[in-house]
Image (cartoon, rainbow, N blue to C red):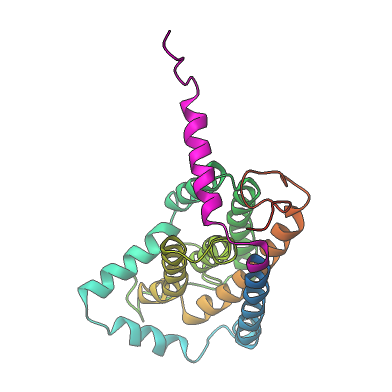
Amino acid sequence: MSEPKDEKPVETIKDAAQQAAKNETASRRVQRYRTVLFQVILFLTIGIFALLAFLVKTTLSFPLDLPITHALQSIDSPFFAGLMRLISWPGFFPQSMIITLIIALGLYVYGLHWESVISLLAALFSGIFNQLVKDLIQRPRPSISIVDVFSVLESYSFPSGHVMFYTILFGFIWYLAFTLFKSSLLRSFLLGLFGTFILLVGVSRIYLGQHWASDVLGAYLLGGLTLAGIVLLYQWGKRRFLVRQPVASPDSKEK
């Protein structure tokens, strides 16, 4: 009699994916160390932006905004122009929604269930907080009469929605790769990929004429604050919800 065929190929694939993720997961001691280091760097960055953000909120015209835009737009390079458009592209709807769902689904399939939930909340909070502040400040976007505008947008300018979305969602994924994964090519690739998008999105928004530099700085500040809250929520809920998830569970043994 021949052996029965596997009737659950999906479960087999899922188990294989989760085992691969376990193999890439660093020890709890390393995770704790990286978490503390990440938070120190994050709060130092927030402090640096704090004074600039205060000036932006109280001054409609920031002296360095126009010179910075002119300096970036003076770069005459088709490659640079294409790169700036590529960096900004994921932040527009519907790409931003699709990318968020892909990230959340990918985390869930690999056994990171709580991380998947928090990634969805990160994207949600990014949109809510950005819109609230934009409606409060009501700052106009750069005018086509003084800068080159790639595409005219009707929403308010401060703070940049792209920068907040990248800082909060991509920043959370960067945090997960930094704290959970062992040193490997995969970890280095993820850190490099998401770090590059976070760093360059601010430049791209200014280059494309859709935001002032002060919009970008304000977005990094508010995005950083929100990311800090997301990380704290993640850490708090880690030991309360889905603690028996297949990968990176709080009660998992040290490796």
- Residue 234 location (% of width, % of height): 69, 58
Q: Count how many numbered circles sit on residues in the image.
A: 0
- Residue 22 location (% of width, % of height): 56, 50
Decide if residue 13 is on the left or right side of residue 76: right
State the residue at coordinates (27%, 74%).
Answer: 80
- Return the residue found at the far right: 240
The image quadrant of residue 131 is bottom right
State the residue at coordinates (75%, 46%).
Answer: 241
- Residue 145 location (% of width, % of height): 35, 78
Dominant secondary structure (helix, strand or loop) of the stretch shown in magenta: helix
Quadrant where the C terminus is found in the figure: bottom right
- The answer to whether residue 251 is above or below residue 170 is above
State the residue at coordinates (42%, 69%).
Answer: 192
Decide if residue 136 is on the left or right side of residue 195: right
- Residue 210 location (% of width, % of height): 42, 71
- Return the residue found at the far top: 1
- The answer to whether residue 219 is above or below residue 26 is below
- Return the residue found at the far front: 1
Q: Which of 50 and 143 is in front in this view?
A: 50
- The answer to whether residue 2 is above or below residue 49 is above
